[in-house]
Amino acid sequence: MNDSTPSAPRLVRALGPWMAVAIVVGTIIGSGVFKKPQQVAEMAPYFGLAALAWILGGVLALLGSLALAEVAVLYPHAGGNYVYLREAYGRLAAFLWGWVEFWMIRGASIAALATVFSEALHDVLGNARFRETLGLSPTRHVLNHWEQRGLTVAVILTLALVNVRGVRWGGVLQLFITLVKIGSLLAIAVLPFAAGWFVPSSADGPGPSAANLAPWWPASWQMSTLTGFGTALLGVMWAYHGWMNIAPVAGEVRNPDRNLPLAFLAGTGIVIFLYLGANLAYSLVLPAGEMAQCKDTPVATVFSERLLGPIGAALASGAVMCSAFGALNGNLLVGPRVLYAMGDDRLAPRRLAAIHPRFHTPAVAIIVLAVWAALLVLAAGFHADPNRADSQSVFDILTGFAMFGATTFETLAVATIFVFRRTQPEAERPYRCRAYPWVPAVYVAILALVVVNQFWSQPTEALFGLAFIGLGALVYFAVFRGPAESQAATEATEAEPTADVP
């Protein structure tokens, strides 16, 4: 709250450079690198095109980081994109970001991550050798479609209750989880080259081969090729999604002038390196056609089973579980901050800004976000038909639902650098975007093409997203644009009190 009384709680700048980098890396690496290679292989079944999609996605994340780091240093307060959009475009843009962030982006992201967690747990429990060890039938199907949805909802609500009670991921724990994720991807990257030394005799299928990289490039280009590549790029962008997640907690980063740009750039660079290595490893072992069939099982699990047998599959599923669980918890920590800020700014029900008197957490915001994510899981479960071969997976439905709003408003957030360079030319900028204006211009132009492509490749998700943004505008003018707007806007521009931790 913008309360200046001495007893009012205030944010503490307790996050140093390593923790800031760990937040970026840990929230980016969730489920995408394990699951989205399937969508990429299905939409762009050529190694050259698939590799281009992963490289381009990384370059876009890096360009966005270069630009947004300048904006974050200019406004190092809690709220991230909400603050940038409000200061650049006004309260309507800020409200629409919060509207889309809650209803489309964050809720669907939490639902998708929890879905990956429950599916990975299903894979571990369904592993024949693992079940034999427990004395269970190796052929029994563990969880059906709706049992997995029930488990997914339970995981979301349980983590929400844990966060309501004030649990915090300390610096050491957060760094440890991030290191586990990095270690898992490094292991995947080197496994094809080291497999010859320890592949057990029970491993099924051939090992790594350069022949699996064929076909390299399409013989001819058609509109379906271009739209397929656009859809593949959208899947890759989901895998990189989260590089902005240091922005909502910028008010708690120590020495933000230095550590915010470091976190953006170093974190994104680490993830690009890991993603390219892991996807090269996948392609050396699994041909594109086979990878495209991995709709119900993460590509990482099939990859590891091919090289190490059932034990490898169980280990890979465990890594996916750990990664998705960490990213899920991170989203449940970051997401409610936007709802809290909107409530405090009178752009959402004031109740969302309430702090639990005992646990000192935004309990209402956490529970509201978790319940919405759970409802999305159930809705996607009805839409996905496990008995239809052409049916989208629950994961792809949820991520497609999230990415239209994300690509639209996060592109607008990066574009705020143009506004602030024009309206605040004399402002102190300890960090300045390199190669301005080309870096943000390239990012905005390519992301605009991705948004347009969604109307061709995913018209249902795009049109629904556009209609939902329009509905948000109606809600704003009907409910939140009132006599208190000017006063609320004045309060919102005041810097939040913060304190450095020595």
Image (tube, rainbow, N blue to C red):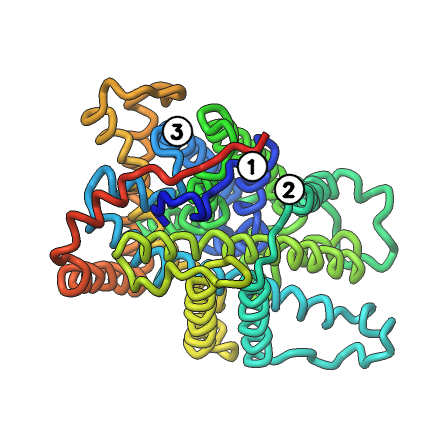
Q: Tell me if 279 is positioned left or right of 434 in this view.
A: right
Going from N to C along the chain, the mark reached first, 3 or 1, is 1
The alpha-carbon separation of the residues under discs 3 and 1 comes to: 15 Å
Point 12% across, 56% down: residue: 483
Mark 3–mark 2 CB contact (< 8 Å)? no
The alpha-carbon separation of the residues under discs 3 and 2 comes to: 22 Å
Q: Which residue is mark 1?
A: 15
- Residue 118 point in image, percent of width and height: 61, 68
Mark 1, Cα crowd under 10 Å, few <14 / some 14-19 / many 20+, is many
Mark 3–mark 1 CB contact (< 8 Å)? no
Quadrant where the C terminus is found in the figure: top right
Disc 2 residue type (three-letter): Gly
| Most foreground residue, 428 or 497 | 497
Q: Which residue is mark 3?
A: 73
- Whether residue 218 is visible: no
Q: Which residue is mark 2?
A: 171
Q: Tell me if 48 is positioned left or right of 408 in this view.
A: right
Mark 3, Cα crowd under 10 Å, few <14 / some 14-19 / many 20+, is many
Element class at badge 2: helix
Disc 1 residue type (three-letter): Leu
Point 43% across, 50% down: residue: 232
- Residue 315 point in image, percent of width and height: 75, 56
Q: Tell me if 102 is positioned left or right of 16 in this view.
A: left
